[in-house]
Image: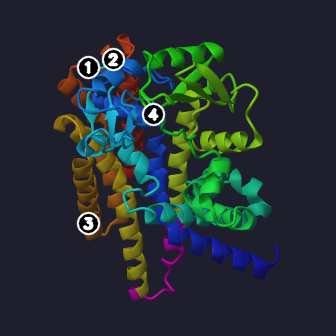
Amino acid sequence: MKKRPYNILFHLHTVSGIVISVLLYVIFFAGSFSFFRDEIVNWERNDNMVSTTDMQLNIDVALDSLTKNYVLEGRDITFKKYYEERQPAVTLGMSKDTLIAESDRAGAFFYLHDKKFTEESYSDSYNLGEFLYRLHFFAQIPYPYGYYISGFTAFFFLFALVTGILIHWDKIVSNFFLFRPKAKLKMLWTDAHTALGTIGLPFQLVYAVTGAFFMLQTILVAPYAIAFFNKDQEKLMTALEYRDPVYEYAQVPLNKKVLVEEYVEQTKKRWKHFNVTKVIVYNYLDANMHVYIEGQLDADKRFSGAGKISYKVADDSVEVLKDPYTGNTYLDGVKTAVYRLHYGDYAGYPLRLVSFVMGIIGCVVILSGVLIWFNARNKKNISDKDRKYNERVASVYLAICLSMYPITALTFIAVKINGGSGIFFLYWFYFIGWLLFSLFFIVKNNTRLTNSYTLLLGSVFGFLIPFVNGFVTSNWFWMALAENNFHCFFIDVFWLVVSLVTFYVFLKVRRK
């Protein structure tokens, strides 16, 4: 490559990387833990959860329990399982029966435990797994600004990846095998940046593309709504199959005993290996009552296997809206591929563990890129004023980013001691704690101290997590494994391994 195009690409790569570096670090760090969102949720609640996407809720028992607090006649009732946890979401649409008192017709949203049938609001059921998952796309910032910030960060990250490939293309193979741990700091960080960046490149490309797609899809599909659907976004969403069917209310009582669970079982018999993730009861106890069931085949049976079916309760007629074995279209394949590539949920724990490691490698690549920039500006020909300014910038950056490790580990301890979390507790504890850690290291203004002590504190807090969990719940990780409570066992052992690894890194850094 000629010198001028190389310099242009190099500066574009540097500027785009520096601009998004802090945001990108938060996305990668929180996103790495999000691969184990469900395990974290069940660990926090001490729930023994079977790893399956199939809804374990008995719909008929759930409806009976809901009649104690709600008038259900004439409602559209949705049961949706988003994740592998014991609390599927329940949405009660406003009742269409005008004979019911106005106060009893209002809609509601809550989470329902699939065994205890206890209800929790969104804020009360908010947990650490959900918090970290939502943090990785800045959902804590009011919608849609947080989504757009994370989406454009992913987009500019893709830009940084492409320019990085181009500037390293001529020597990408030779530089990959070049590592000089005893050389100057700039050389050390440059070698780490190049080698780890090359190792994680496929992973980073996938997450840059899919992340931008998820967060910016409203902007991306807008031209299609204008060009092909006459600006009617509702028609576009229907064409993309993001809308559920609609059934009119007949205003005539249904003279038949209703057993919704029978329709669920009938669907599973029709399609083997089918996991029910969504059940909608339309027009409950009305003559035009329908039961709509949606789900997916096991990932190991078919990568893209979405299925939809609707039953008319009055005459038990069946309308197959999508056969998971034969009815999946190109659109289904694209949506499933994007979703599963981003979440890494199609190959079990090995893939998720590899994805976690790749995410942490992404954090190291981001850090090394900033440190390369800092060391390149820490030269004798730079004035003392500029050098101190650059040093302050690097110190602030490292303090904010590296403080995520100890505060995340400490929050795991806090939710156990507190007996749960909830949205207000998590927001207060995590963000205030993160701020205090960051301010402490910013005041210290010592990058070596920041690097060492964040590793040390994170390692100590992480090592204490399984022991705090054992003392609080009496569910020690070896007992959890014996009781087949794998989610709780996994998180405890996961933190033991992570804390030991980072403590080893701390010893190496301190010795260096």
Residue matched to label 4: 283
Task: Find out whether the residues at labels 2 and 1 contact each other: C-beta distance under 8 Å.
Answer: yes
User: How many residues crowd around disc 1 within 10 Å: few (fewer than 14), some, or many (20 or more)?
Assistant: some
Sequence-wise, the earlier of marks 2 and 3 is 3
Q: Is 16 on the left-hand or right-hand side of 374?
A: right
Q: Kindly identify which residue carries mark 1.
A: 475
Residue 102, percent across and down? 26, 45
Q: Residue at x 58, y 61 (%)?
A: 218
The residue that label 3 is drawn on is 439
Whether residue 295 can be seen here: yes
Using the image as rendered, state which of residue 155 and residue 306 is in the foreground. Answer: 306
Label 2–label 4 contact, CB within 8 A? no
Q: Which mark sits nearer the N-terminus, 3 or 1? A: 3
> Residue at coordinates 33% horizontally, 35% vertically from top-left?
111
What residue type is disc 1 on? Answer: Asn
Amino acid type, callout 3? Leu
Q: What element carries label 1?
A: loop
Q: Does the magenta stretch include residue 350?
A: no
Q: In which quarter of the image is residue 292?
A: top right
- Tell me which numbered mark, 4 or 1, is placed earlier along the sequence: 4
